[in-house]
Amino acid sequence: MKSPLILTSAFVASALTAIGYFTAGAVTAFNAESIAIGLFVGAFLSPMIIKMMAGSKSSDDVKTLYVGNLPYRANESAVRELFSEHGFVHSVRLMKDKHTGKRRGFGFVEIAAADASNAIETLNDSEFQQRTLKVREAKERPEPS
């Protein structure tokens, strides 16, 4: 299931491209140059709008949970499905080894802040694919000095 932000971002990107196309066409006669200008304007503005929309979610709305002791065969969709039973999941990141590409047995789930404590209580020390999960609120990474 795609998040509403992704759907909205895709819609905004295509809308801005169309706006750029029609704006350029209205200013000058329809020709290859005006079409190129319109597409450029839309393509240039779309990523900027998407970044602003993605940055607009405040940290008060979302909590990041650390999920440890994950089975190595678990994938993002299985973890998302598990956590979705306990709240709205924004994202799932399962960590992999840089060199081998194999999963490392832990990851992070961004979940709605209102649902985080329920998910922690319910899923911590629960069994998932024959492993006992460790779920807690993730610690902030220290800033490099």
Image (cartoon, helix red, strand yellow):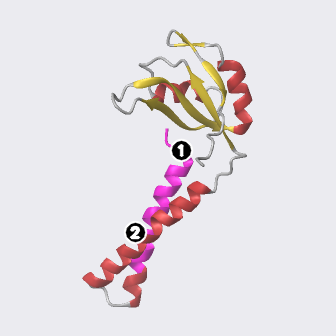
Picture coordinates of residue 23 (x, y %)? 43, 82
Contact between marks 2 and 1 (CB within 8 A): the answer is no
Residue 101 placement, left or right of 123: left
- The amino acid on which the numbered mark 2 sits, given as a three-letter code, is Ala
- Circle nearer the viewer, 2 or 1: 2
Residue 66 placement, left or right of 2: right
Picture coordinates of residue 140 (x, y %)? 65, 39
Residue in the image at 47% along x and 17% along y: 71
Point out which mark residue 125 bears: none
Residue under pointer 2: 43
Residue in the image at 50% along x and 35% along y: 93
- The amino acid on which the numbered mark 1 sits, given as a three-letter code, is Ser
Q: Is residue 14 above or below residue 121?
A: below
The secondary structure that most of the magenta stretch takes on is: helix
Residue under pointer 1: 3
Q: Which of the 4 image quarters holds residue 132? A: top right
Q: Is residue 56 magenta?
A: no
Q: Is residue 6 magenta?
A: yes
Residue in the image at 60% along x and 49% along y: 145
Task: Give the camera-side residue of 57 and 100.
Answer: 100
Give SS at disc 2.
Answer: helix
Mark 1, other Cα within 10 Å: few <14 / some 14–19 / many ≥20: few
Picture coordinates of residue 107 (x, y %)? 53, 29
Q: Which span of residues is magenta-colored? A: 1-22
Q: Which of the 4 image quarters holds residue 102? A: top left
